[in-house]
Each structure stands twice: as structure tokens, then as C-alpha cells.
Image: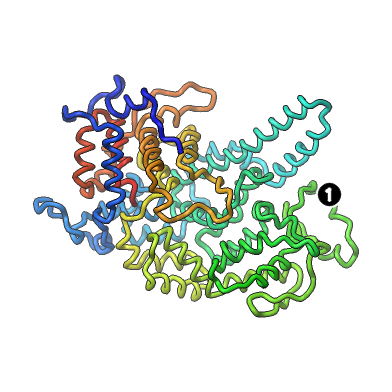
Amino acid sequence: MPSSVNAADSAAITGPRPEDPPLHGAPTAPALGRRQWLATAAAGLYGAAALPLVPWASVLAPRQAHAAEGPSPEAAMPAAAAHVRLLDRLTWGANAAALGQLQRSGVQATVAALLRPAPQAPLPPEAQAQIDAMDITRTPMETLAIGLQARQQAIKNEPTEDARKAAQDAYQKDMRALQRQAERRFLLRAVYSPAQLQEKLTWFWMNHFSVFAGKADIRAMVADYEDRAIRPHALGRFRDLLGATVRHPAMLRYLDNAQNAAGRINENYARELMELHTLGVDGGYSQRDVQEMARVLTGHGVSLRPLNEPPPKLKPEWARLYVRHGLYEFNPQRHDWNPKELLGQPLQGQGMAELDEALDRLARAPATARFVTRKLAAYLVGDAPPPALLQALAERFRQTDGHIGAVLQTLIASDAFQASLGKRLRDPVQYVMAGLRLGYSDQVLANADPALGWLQRLAEPLYGRATPDGYPLDAAAWTSSGQMAVRFEVARGLGGAGTNALYRAEGAPPPKMPPPAIAQSSAFKALEPLLVPATRVALARATSPAEWNTFLLSAPEFMYA
């Protein structure tokens, strides 16, 4: 991954710019250079065990820190710092508004509200207006996809090669625009929605049930997939979530089930459904189970015929069984109607009912409970959750028929969760969203594209994982020297170098905006007691507000949450 910094960037990092006034009381010691601070930050990242832990007791029963006694012991963690660490884990990042709400409502009420968000949680009007203006909001996914398919077919009829190329370029541009709208919508919700845990779990499940927007026409479908298949079920029942993804055209297209038919079996989706979505690679299923599940899935596909067009001509015995909902269709003529077994037991249903029976069996299998809850624990606790926690989560999953919110309630109340706060490395999406929430919550961004570009540079673009396993959740995937170097540059953008671009309206010149006042944020002031000496030294040497922001956002205390 590129990590070079040009001469102008280096000057901005290592010294003040004319437009950046020095901080009041800023020392005259030499500014830290990029390489110096990278070394400092890396030392903190790879020695993260030395960071202070946040005990849950200090959240529920705050105790005063004893500043005169030197570095505070864990039992004396200031309550406000513990609150920030809790918000950092359960939201896309703490900010002043969220911290104030938690302090007014209390921890238990805040966690309860996050687990049960209000339907249609309102966004700031400026954010909602941007979303309302998008094609993905104004036009149903079915209309978009069918129209684009018709355009693609019409390209073949253009009279000249130049005309065909121009039409193809316009088609690809419009497809990319639909994906970019979905990305912008995701970012606005992640930064500004009050339903923070729902938004954070929406990303988790989008990664679990991953689709690659760059394949075929999925760019036209990914926004709807997120909004109708994933988000409504992110804190609900796993079985409902599973069923919504199985019948969504984005998933059927991505894993080639649209080509899966009796006599022409395609096992792609069946294999990933069992290995990645439910049972896990060591979930006890066999190759025969994959083959049987592929047969169950035959006939479930995608139709891009106009919505007002009559069903395809089928034999009378098949015509009454044909089903179409939007772009999803069940074509009984393509389905394998022979008897099937799954996980050692026969399936009693047939056709569409057979699929629901198979999904019930997969969703309620003990291996699914273990696999799914372990992945949730990896996301919200750490790379190696303790066995006692994993056992408790799997049991809760089984007791509640896979209710995700109930599993999270058990997880949040656990000692392992409490002990992990402040120690989980943020992956690139969490890092960028946390920086935006900390610095840009007071005024809604006018242009999300710079932040989306940062995710691209950090190798975690939204909807950009080509393989169906989703982006890795383990810290080791995001701690290379190249990743850290790029994060430093992204920190510069978040800290002030990118502020003008983030508020540039489409077609207008960038406004002159001050860097975010992170040092004055109550969220930072609450976190300040946790800063290690190296971070304090670096911040004291900053020669401008933008440089101060850059150093904080590059520090291990911000890299971890």
C-alpha cells in the first residue's frame, strides 16, 4: 500500500503552516517529525497491554481518581474516561453529545437504548436531506436494476464502436454512482445516527454476509441489500437475518445461485452459506451436506424482467408454484424436487418450504450458535475471547432462538467485555468513523468522499471485499508498517488537512474551515487522564491545532477502543 508523503505534506506534518496559529502556551521545543511520531505511535500500538484498562465497576459505580498519587490504578479510573471507553466500543466512536447523554441517562439506560433503538431513529436534517436526494432513496432497487439491465442490452445495438464505448462508459459511471451513494449513506448514518449500535452491527452483518459490489450488477443492489436485508435485523433474530439475505438478489447474484438449477448444480452459495454464514468451517457438515444444500437452493434466483411482465410460460403444474417478489424469483421448473437430507436428517418440505426448513435447521444448529457468537465476541471483545464467555454466549443464542440483542446483552455484562475496553484495535472503518464522530459531529459533512477515499487507501473500502469471507476482524490484519504509515496520513486529513474538502458542496469551491477543536471536546477531556507519557510529550510539541489533532489521532489511545 502506498505510504509516501510529498514535500508539501511533510512540511505540514513536521511544522506549522502560516494559516495555522500556534496553540496558546505551546512550547518552543522542536515539532515531532513524521518518522518520530510513527515510531512513538507504533511503540504504543505494539505494547498496547500497557494501556490502562477500564473496569466495569468504575462505570457503574464511579470513584474519584487520585491525581496526586501519580498514574491512577485501574480501580481509580475516572468515571468519564470509562464512559468514553464504553461508548468507543458500543458506538462508532465517542463524541461530546453521546458522552453528555450517557452522563445524563446513566450507563444502564444508555446500553438499553442502544440495544433497542427507536424505529427510524432521526438523523440531523442536513444529513437526512442528503440521503433523501439520492437515487437509491428516490427510486426502488428493482427499477434501478431493471433499467440498467435494459441499458446494457441496448449498448449492443449502438451503430458504431465509438457509440458503444460511450454508452458503456455512461453505464459504468451510473453504476459506480449508485455504489458511491450507498457508501455516502452508510457514512452519514455511522457518524450521525443516534442508533449507533444498530449501525455498528449493520456493518458487522454486512461483513458477515458479505457481497462484493464490483461483481456484475450488484452496485445497483447493495444499498437495498443493506437497508432491507441487513439493517432491520441487525439486533433481531439471526434466523430472520439469514432468511432475508438468502432471498436477496445481491446475495443470489454474488454467489452464483442464479445459475443453480436441477441438472446444473452450482455449489458456491451452499458452501459459503454453511462455512461462512452459519455452521463455520469446523461445524460438522460434510461435502454431501453441501451438495444437498445446493439442491435445496435450486430454482431460487434473480429475474430482471420488467415488473409488470407476466410470469414465464411454464407447465401448468409448475405455473401455480412460481413466485416472484421484486427481483427474487422461485422458478419451480429449475428446482430439484427429489428427496434430500441435511445434517443427517431428511427434509420434509418441498420447494420454497424446503428452503425454510433447511434454514431453520442451520440457524438452530449448535455449531451455528458457537460460530456466530464467537464472531460477535471477536468483534466486540477481542481476538481471543475467553472460553467461558464463548460458552455463555452460545448458550444465550440457543435459549433465545438466536436473538442477537439478547446475546449482546450477555456479552456487555461479562467480565471479559469489561476488561477489554480500551484494548481492541480499531480496524480502518472503525478508525475513520471514530475520527469523524470525534471531530465532525457538530456540523454535518457536505462531502463524504474524502473519508471514503481514506478507507480505500486503508484497504477496507465499503462493499469492496472481493472474497465472501468479509474483511478480517483480527488485529494482526491491520498492524503492518504500511497500514500505520497510511493511518498517520489519514490522521492528518481528519485532523484538519481534509476539513475543507469534507465541507465542500458539490460544484462549489472548498470553504475555508478551521480544524476540528478536538482539544476542547468533552470526550477528549474525559479521555485525557488515560494518555501515556509519550502521547503527552507529542501533544505538547504540536505547533498548531491541526498538528495537535494529527498527533492525538495517531496515538495508541485513539487507535485502540
Q: Which residue sits at x=46%, y=39%?
A: 1
Vertical position of residue 495 compared to residue 244: above or below = above
Q: Nearer the viewer, residue 148 or 469?
A: 469
Q: Nearer the viewer, residue 46 or 31?
A: 46
Q: Outermost residue, top direction?
A: 18
Q: Picture coordinates of residue 493 (x, y %)?
A: 39, 33
Pointer 1 local density, CA inside 10 Å: few below 14, some 14–19, many at least 20: few
Q: Which residue sits at x=54%, y=23%?
A: 507
Q: Nearer the viewer, residue 47 or 497?
A: 47
Q: Amino acid at mark 1?
A: Glu
Residue 118 shows up from this direction: no
Q: Which residue sits at x=23%, y=26%?
A: 22
Q: Picture coordinates of residue 18 (x, y %)?
A: 29, 19
Q: What SS does tag 1 mark?
A: loop
Q: Quadrant of residue 437?
A: top left
Q: Picture coordinates of residue 548 (x, y %)?
A: 27, 34
Q: Quadrant of residue 347?
A: bottom right
Residue that label 1 marks: 309
Vertical position of residue 442 compared to residue 375: above or below = above
Q: Which residue sits at x=30%, y=22%?
A: 17
Q: Outermost residue, left direction?
A: 68
Q: Picture coordinates of residue 201 (x, y %)?
A: 48, 56
Query: Taking 24 as reference, is 94 left or right?
Result: right
Query: Taking 389 as reference, is 370 left or right?
Result: right
Residue 344 shows up from this direction: yes
Query: Taking 539 as reference, is 224 left or right?
Result: right
Vertical position of residue 105 compared to residue 12: above or below = below
